[in-house]
Image: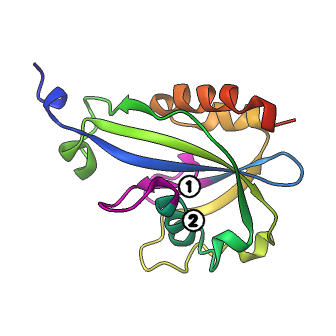
Amino acid sequence: MSESAERPYRPNVGALLRDSEGRFLLGERIDRPGSWQFPQGGVDPGESPEEALWRELGEELGLEEPRSVCRVLGVGPTMCYDFPPAMKTGIARRYRGQEQTLFLLEFFGSKEGIQLDRDSLPEFRAVTWVPVEEMLERIWGPKRPNLVQTLEALAHLLD
């Protein structure tokens, strides 16, 4: 058995925020210019996936009251993905990969309410709103199958 196969998957949630024009929010990682992802993060011990979702939206987007500007439309299937063997970050040394659940949310707040520098350790340097096709192109390869399956499972909510 490989060393990575012995490590657990990290419970994780992600937010597919959709605006009134049907575009999705992506954030450019501060530590990896040119690398775009949806807001996401780990589920802390004792925390439900939905609690983690709201916490992450506050931390990563600086939304003071995320529930006042977002509404959950649906939840995708929970799926696992492995980190590439060459990945040597701290998280990849502790976990094999992530067990990720993606939430589809309607964003009806002011885009000016997104304050990336509100957290003391910001994750994103910039955000952009893109059509679903562009989101699929920009998302990191290991996360793409989960994104595709979530979009398929929630297609009835995307019309």
Where is residue 83 drawn, in percent x and y?
32, 34
Q: Is residue 143 above or below residue 104?
A: above
Q: Which residues are magenta?
A: 27-50
Where is residue 113 drawn, in percent x and y?
73, 76
Could you tell me how far apart the alpha carbons at marks 1 and 2 are, in whole angstroms? 7 Å
> Who's the residue at 26% across and 32% down the image?
86
At label 1, counting other C-alpha atoms closer than 10 Å, the crowd grade (few under 14, some 14-19, many 20 or more) is: many
Q: Amino acid at mark 1?
A: Pro
Residue 66 in view in this figure: yes
Tag 2 secondary structure: helix
- Is 34 in the magenta? yes
Q: Amino acid at mark 2?
A: Leu
* Closer-to-camera residue (66/19): 66
Mark number, residue 68: none
Q: Is residue 37 above or below residue 138?
A: below
Mark number, residue 57: 2
Per the image, the residue denoted by label 1 is 39
